[in-house]
Image: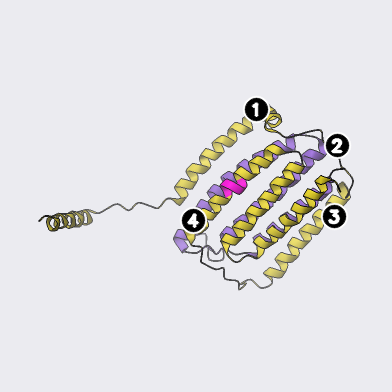
Amino acid sequence: MPLDNVVFWVFGPVAVASAVGMLFMRNAVHAALFLIVNFMCLAVMYLLLDAPFLFAVQIIVYAGAIMVLFLFVIMLLGVDRHEDLRERLRGQRIMGLALAAGAALEIGLAVRAGIGFGRHVPPSTLSGTAETLAKPLFTTYFFPFEVTSILLIVAAIAAMVLAQRKARAVTEAEARALNAERATGAQEMAP
Amino acid sequence: MRTPIAFFLVLSGILFSVGTAGVLLRRNALVIFMSVELQLNAVNLALVAFARMHGDLRGQVLAFFSMIVAAAEVVVGLAIIVSVYRRRLSVDVDDASELRG
């Protein structure tokens, strides 16, 4: 068995298992950790598909930055809350599972009809290193590349605006009370 | 002989379906959001697989852009979840059933 297949059959099932684990974990932190495992497995898949640059980006951006952000928000909102598992819409669970299974079946059939299993093993002619990816990125796709930088800035500002706590203005009476408190505190401190 | 492209596409389809099930079945807004991320990653895997199949680097460039947009989307989405939590003290999507703030 060639090495490529060995790596695929080790990391593929782990990817599926971690995704299913994320689906069934009640605790949001456990779900996030399973998702990190899944992202790592996908990074290995990128390596198999001759995309070493995307492999690095996947680990740095997804498994690093995005998941840390997720964990940060989970901690901020409280880790110990548990999801209410009673379903309020009748039949939603069965219909949701049926829809997901239908989607999987449909994609499988589409792949079989489109390119067929087992065939199509093209010789590797490309490798997505930082050097080869930089060429189209900074020539043909330079404009979209710059637009994404604006998008990131807008997103950062939007996050700050959305998540800020409104600072309450201190009223005059409160300020006076605060000052008086400080004054008595200073007197008590004095010998 | 290397791994057939179809295997990667099937893996991508399975992960996408699991993500769909997560979006439909879970009610914690954070877990739903994580499932959406799983779906985005599955599509990225399909893009990279097709790039390899056609020997065309543009698929990888598109996957790269989709990662950037996903990062921006996560930042804004999490900020919205935090502000909804501040207002309702809940991350359950069933509790946020009105358009009124």
Question: Helix, strand or loop at disc 3?
Answer: helix
Q: Looking at the picture, how far across and down is residue B76, in whole percent?
A: 53, 48
Residue named by callout 2:
A123
Residue named by callout 4:
B82
Q: Chain of mark 4?
A: B
Q: Earlier in the sequence, mark 1 or mark 2?
A: 2
Residue named by callout 3:
A109
Viewer-proximal residue, A151 or A1? A1
- How far, Cα to Cα, is label 1 from label 4? 36 Å
Which chain does yellow denote in the image? Answer: A
- How far, Cα to Cα, is label 4 from label 2? 48 Å
Residue named by callout 1:
A138
Q: Looking at the picture, how far across and down is residue B35, in whole percent?
A: 64, 56
- How far, Cα to Cα, is label 3 from label 4? 40 Å
- Which residues fall within the magenta stretch? A62-66
- How far, Cα to Cα, is label 1 from label 3? 38 Å
Residue B65 falls inside the magenta stretch: no
Same-chain status of marks 1 and 4: no
Direction from residue B37 to residue A48 in the image, left or right? right
Q: Amino acid at mark 2?
A: Pro
- Badge 4 crowding class, 10 Å Cα cut-off, few under 14, some 14 to 19, many 20 or more, is many
Q: Looking at the picture, how far across and down is residue A47, in whole percent?
A: 73, 42
